[in-house]
Amino acid sequence: MNPQEKFCHNEPCWAYARAGEGHIVIHSQKERRYRCKRCTKTFSETKGTALYRSHKPHELVATIVTLLAYGCPVQAIVAAFGFDERTVARWQRESGWQCQRVHEHLLQAGGVLLAQVQADELRIRIVGGVLWLASALSVTSRLWLGGVVQVRRDRRLVRTLLEYVRACGASFRSLLLCTDGLATYPKQALSVLREPLRTGRRGRPQLLLPEGLMVAQVIKRYARRRVVGVLHRVVRGTQEAVEARLRSTQGDEAALINTAYIERLQATFRSRLAPLARKTRAAVRQEATLEAGMWLIGTVYNFCRAHRSLRLAIGGRGTTQRRRWVERTPAQAAGLTDHCWSLYELLIFTVPPAVPKRRGRRPRWLLEAAHAA
């Protein structure tokens, strides 16, 4: 138990959401509880996580969530472990919310270096209707940037996805966005990815597109549900600049505009989320269930699974030592973490909330902490 990593969960307390300042002490080693010295409130170690108030052993819950994250249907878990189906569904839903909080806290802080981003959608059949799942991927680090689940494949779906991409990226001056033939992508990209021009004058700043922003599309032509032709179109930028960016990010000598990386990730989603499999009988009934499964699988893909194409070689040819490899996850390749997370570590990770603005006189200890910082 490390009280330096914890913060007070009592919102009226002045130490709320403030970690590493000595406010939290250990209250009970046996019950694994902490206490805030400012408001004297106690809280559990799992407060604010997916394992909070879990009456089952945490290792067992982590095992169930691992099976869900790797494509095991809920009905199979119920038959194997004897749990109620609503209990397993609740664990899946709470773990999905936990993964969404971790994703927004670590990825949407604006520190991901984006060189090439690919975006695409999935058509999913549910009980009594159809849903669309749009996702985005950073090619250099294979990092999943987020997804949106919606009933219609319209402007709102694409705009929400591009807002996730904007929240993750640090700069868009050298970004290449590759999408399919949906006409909404170029229009929304040229609107969402604009940056304000700061001149120091009063009033709203002018929004301009970055000079190095490039947008390209892959338009597939179908005949009798078969692809008969592919058109590569550059919407913004030059053909030479787009080809140079494709060669630098994908490592191909003669790279064409493609969405192969996001399509491969979508195949991973279909294999690991039971309702996404074609001609399945494990269809979902609610949009929230599919959204929770999407966040769970996407976050596990980013933090808990090493990607083979991201491994680094130690040694090599021409040396006496045998070549060895260092496995890396997409989060490690993007510089967000320094190790491969376990699924229990993902479920127990506490996301600090935003510090609220308060009125009134600050206490002396808070003024001393601010002065020391």
Image (cartoon, helix red, strand yellow):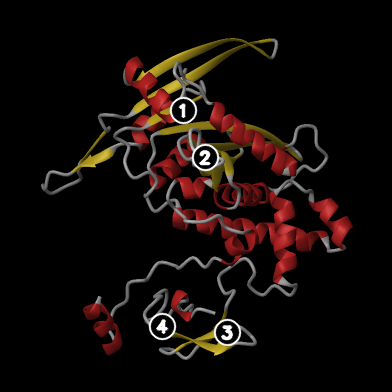
Tell which of 190 and 46 is nearer to you: 46
Q: How many marks?
A: 4
How far apart are the alpha carbons under marks 1 and 2? 30 Å
Q: Which residue is mark 3?
A: 33
- For disc 3, the neighbor class at 10 Å (few under 14, some 14 to 19, many from 20) is some
- For disc 1, the neighbor class at 10 Å (few under 14, some 14 to 19, many from 20) is few
Q: Is residue 252 above or below residue 269?
A: above
How far apart are the alpha carbons under marks 3 and 1? 48 Å
- Amino acid type indicated by mark 1: Gln
How far apart are the alpha carbons under marks 2 and 4? 61 Å
Q: Earlier in the sequence, mark 3 or mark 4?
A: 4
Looking at the rendered structure, the secondary structure element under dot 1 is helix
Mark 1 touches mark 2? (CB < 8 Å): no
Of labels 2 and 3, the one closer to you: 2
Q: Which residue is mark 1?
A: 250
Mark 4 touches mark 1? (CB < 8 Å): no
Please provide percent x and percent y for residue 325: 55, 43
Mark 3 touches mark 1? (CB < 8 Å): no
Looking at the rendered structure, the secondary structure element under dot 4 is loop
Q: Is residue 72 visible?
A: yes
Q: Residue at x 58, y 46 (%)?
A: 306
Q: Is residue 153 visible?
A: no
Q: Which residue is mark 4?
A: 13
Q: Earlier in the sequence, mark 1 or mark 2?
A: 1
